[in-house]
Amino acid sequence: MSDSPNAKVATYAGLFLITLATLMHEILLTRIFSVTIRYHFAFMAVSVGMFGMTVGAILVYLLPRLFDETRTKQQLAVCASLFSASIVVSFLTHLAVPFITRPVTLVSLYSIGFTYVVIAVPFVFSGICVCLALTRFPGRISQLYAADLAGAAIGCFALVYTLKITDGPTAVIVVAAIAAASALCFAIDASSKSLVVWASVLTVALGAFSVGHTFLSQQQRAVLKLMWVKGAIEQPLLYEKWNSFSRVQVADLPELRTKPFGWGLSSKYRSNGYVPPQLGVDIDAGAGTVLTGFHGDMRALEHLKWDVTNVAHYVRKNADVMVIGVGGGRDVLSALAFDQKSVLGVEYNDNILNTTIGKFRDYTGRLDENPKVRFVNDEARSFVARDKSLHDIIQVSLIDTFAATAAGAYVLAENSLYTAEAWSLFLQRLTPTGVLSFSRWYFPDQPGEMYRVAALARSALESVGVTSARGHIAVVRNMKTIGTLEEEVPMFMGVGTLLVSRAPFTPEDLAALRDVSRKMDFEVVLAPGDATSESTYVQIVEGADPARFQAEFPLNIAPPTDDNPFFFNMLRLRSILDSSLWDQGYMRINMVAVVTLGALVCVVALLTFLCVIVPLMLTTRKESLRGASPLFLYFGAIGFGFMLVEISQMQRLIVFLGHPVYGLSVVLFALLLSSGAGSFFTQRAAASRPAVFLVGLLIALAAFGFLTPVAIRWFGADTTPVRIAVAIGTLLPVGFFMGMALPLGMKLVSNRSRALAPWLWGINGATSVCASVVSVAIALSFGISAAFWAGLLCYAIAVLSYLWVDARKPAPADSESGAGALAPAKEDAPSVAG
């Protein structure tokens, strides 16, 4: 099968577009899943994509008659078309079928598995395309692999801009249209008129629908909508807007028409018959707030003075206030209700700001025009580091509620606001008597969140030179709120507010706290010098050995750090089998999360074993496996190593860049693009000295591991574009060397035992799928750095395995026929999977 230069270009273009669409779809699914299922399942999209593509490659190996090499170009066009069509069908199926996870039964496990398989189907066709492109033209494997990775890299950022223009469901159709365009490229290369016509019709139809439906969605008249959202039928919406890291919706909720809304509203508040206009705002169908109708009538704000989240305003009058997380504007309105001097609202999500002071600005009273109010659209932590102004109050009220709390133990749930480093920075931006106010949910049996913020407060105070934290911390709670934990767990809970100041609280401050608590039926559970303070808090903030106390406490309440930023996970490994924790409100969330993660691991492992390992075991001749253990070790190690490095850096950059999607997109873009360059480099330059470049990989990874934390500290105060550039710059050298490992291994295999190539591809894919989950568990238990260094260890094992194989005398090239056999390497003959 010989190619003209134009045909080669068409193959490269088709492969580029197919991988671009694949990565766009994979990242888009993290966004869709965070709304339709639960936030912690968003990460499942990564393993779904890898699983599906691995199965696709194995099918090429298992069905040689179906995938006859003489029809490769036609098969590429057909499978790319099926990839495009199956994206639409699998997405519609996902929307039409509820996702059941609780209680954990055979039915719920089947629901997880069914969803996993349905979403994986398009990736199977993508995997077939990629495998065919990389195995049918062995003389160009380095260039093709480079085009593969370059397309995937561009797809990472293409989705961010797609979701700036259209909504999530329409973006799925956009991805399908790109996949159809790849089919058109392959069809042109195949010189098949029927395939060209079919691919052209599919591309035009999907493209036209994308454009038309984008217009409809902008007019709030979309016809392709989400149906099942977190197990329930979604109610009608007044407004909906997507971007790359959220879906904001506004609804007219009946319960908001009868009483004022407040997270920790006092039971003694009486509205005197006046209820302000209110609309419900929800982010990803899991984190809610309200828009309060305000037109200058201060009665609309009176209830805010009775909320426990606002007790800081009673101890600091005439204050300059910073609100982190504007949401629907409640905390900004609270500052106005207390007639504070000024209020600065910092909000990372431009969709939230465009809703509160954009689409509904007349409803909310044009807050951006108030001379006391200023809004900033920026990531809070980097903005605070960059902005040197001081504030009398920094208020953070229930940032990341159940949407993140339920995520607990999962990647994409890291939070840069709840670490010791962040709190130290916040304290440095307070005036000498300024107050940092954090409000969290308060569960009476085990108020883990409040215990943990108290530990954070002590750690932060010590970092700024305060040696005795007790006089600088107070905790007030309101336990009069009746709520539900998720949908099916009714419980008694409340809201607590922790106040921390660099200066000791004065008797006047404490008197103000006690007066407002007495008036509103709040409880002061920790106050300087108060003998009635709860003993656990006293131990946390002034115990002689805090590390020992935290280690012996039933929950993990140790202060999170940037290296282990999982604030919402408080379940220790040793407590996973403790059935008593199911009866404790907060820990039930973590227990469910860990059990769900365990179920996901089982599903992934079982599907990988059945769909990848078993077929290879049944079809590969036993004699071809003799002496292959170092090759198995090499490809398994680079699969584990790549994912451990990739996932750990996603987690690290989520903290550095301030949001999960930025961390995901930047890491994938940088590593895939640079890996593509590394793969291309192996075509000639690295081929003569492969071991040297693999050792260079270890050196690059070691340098990266030591220098990256330093770079993050240096550039933490810069703007988001600068931090993105720094992240990409640090990842490119590492990705360049990581991209060499697979093609160098395949070149080694082609000289030793070519019949093993499908086995090795399967092992690499299977270990990558499993490592995507294992890396999260390592980071959760031992920190992000531990996951990264584990990846370096895997690469070290891979290098030793490579040297072991390379030192052996090359065996004659395999010429066996039948399943598992591959022809000798030559241009346009079937070769290795990449």
Image: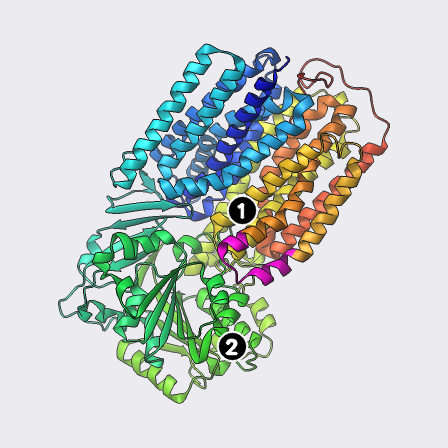
Q: Residue at x 28, y 67 (%)?
A: 333
Q: Position of residue 646 (x, y in %)?
A: 60, 45
Number of numbered discs present? 2
- Say what secondary structure mark 2 lies in: helix
Q: Position of residue 749 (x, y in %)?
A: 75, 27
- Would you say residue 289 sits in the magenta stretch? no
Q: Amino acid at mark 2?
A: Val
Q: Residue at x 67, y 37 (%)?
A: 678
Residue assigned mark 1? 666
Q: Height in image: 521 above or below 741?
A: below
Front position among marks 2 and 1: 1
Residue assigned mark 2? 541
* Disc nearer the start of the sequence (2/1): 2
Magenta residues, start to end:
708-724
Q: Residue at x 47, y 28 (%)?
A: 122
Query: Which color mode does the image show?
Result: rainbow
Quarter-of-image position of residue 795: top right
Prevalent SS, magenta region:
helix
Q: Amino acid at mark 1?
A: Val
Quarter-of-image position of residue 824: top right
Q: Quadrant of the C terminus?
A: top right
